[in-house]
Amino acid sequence: MSKPSSETIAKVYNDWGKGFDDLVSETPFLMNSYLLYDLCLAELTKGKRYSRILDVGCGSGLQAIHLAPYADEVVGIDLSKELIEVAKDRCKAHPNVKFQVANACALPFPDKSFDFLISYGDVLSHIVDGYEQAVTEMGRVAKPGAILTIETDTKWNFGIFYHPSEMIDALRVPGKGHATRVWEGMRFKTFTWRELKSLLEKNGFEILSCRGHNILSSLIPDRYLLEKGKRSPIGKLALAIGRLDLAISGTFPFNRFGFNFVVTARKKG
């Protein structure tokens, strides 16, 4: 299977358009994810005011509108033209929020121009070929002392046992993440903790914290984690476990073991 191009990824999200918000509000997996996003952003904005925030892979603007009251300017970029339009409409009451179509591997901004960077929603994991360049670009546009909070797919979680071929692929690349996780026709680059930590440190970031989401809920089969519409009993269980996952999200070793990491770091200098 070939690696997904930026055009392929953009097409998937363009096709979703406004329907992307339905996924966020209906599927247990994403509902659990956003519990952690909200917790992390609450911690990072409490009593803070930022000059310029960059939202890399901003999607429909859910994080941007959350961050608008805490910054002089919020800039969101995404590959999807359709989602950019949804984001603009969502944030139209916030003149300090701007959006543009751009690629994370070639950020159209000067060096040292942002003091807060966020990249939630598996953006880095989407970039199977070139994820290192995306982190380099984030490091380039980050001011000394800037905060970066970023989410990626983790290599190991209970859910991998439901996908034997993926587990075999994971075992074939010891010490680093595999790039054969598939969802909605897109492939994802997974990361081990050491791999992600090393990549961030290589680009001038020091790790502040690591949290995980969908940790114990990864025991639930995908068809229930991703169900929409009428909630099944197992789907309800996934949401209940998600609240437990939130409570242990920052506790070792649970914070290294789940479907995703959310890592927060600071740019040195």
Image (cartoon, rainbow, N blue to C red):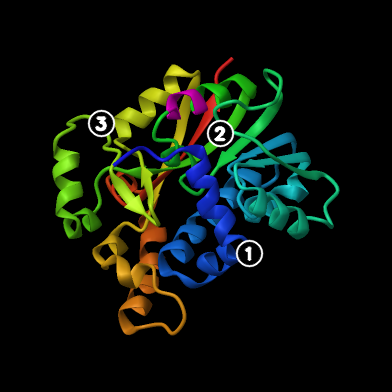
Which quarter of the rendering shows the C terminus?
top right
Q: Is the residue marked by circle 1 packed among few (<14), some (14-19), or many (20+) residues within 10 Å?
A: some
Asked if labels 3 and 1 touch by Cβ distance under 8 angstroms, the answer is: no
Q: Front-most of 239 and 207?
A: 239
Vertically, is 188 above or below 116? below
Where residue 103 sits: x, y (%)?
59, 33
Q: Can you identify the residue that label 1 sits on? A: 18
Q: Which mark is residue 76?
A: none
Vertically, is 14 above or below 146? below
Q: Can you identify the residue that label 2 sits on? A: 148
Most frequent secondary structure within the magenta stretch: helix
Q: Earlier in the sequence, mark 3 or mark 2?
A: 2
Q: Is residue 173 left or right of residue 62?
A: left
Q: Earlier in the sequence, mark 1 or mark 3?
A: 1
Where residue 192 sits: x, y (%)?
29, 36
Residue drawn at x 33%, y 51% is 182
Magenta stretch containing residue 132, yes or no? yes
Where residue 162 sits: x, y (%)?
19, 60
Q: Which residue type does callout 2 highlight?
A: Leu
Secondary structure at badge 2 equals: strand
Task: Choose top left, top right, bottom left or bottom right for residue 242.
Answer: bottom left
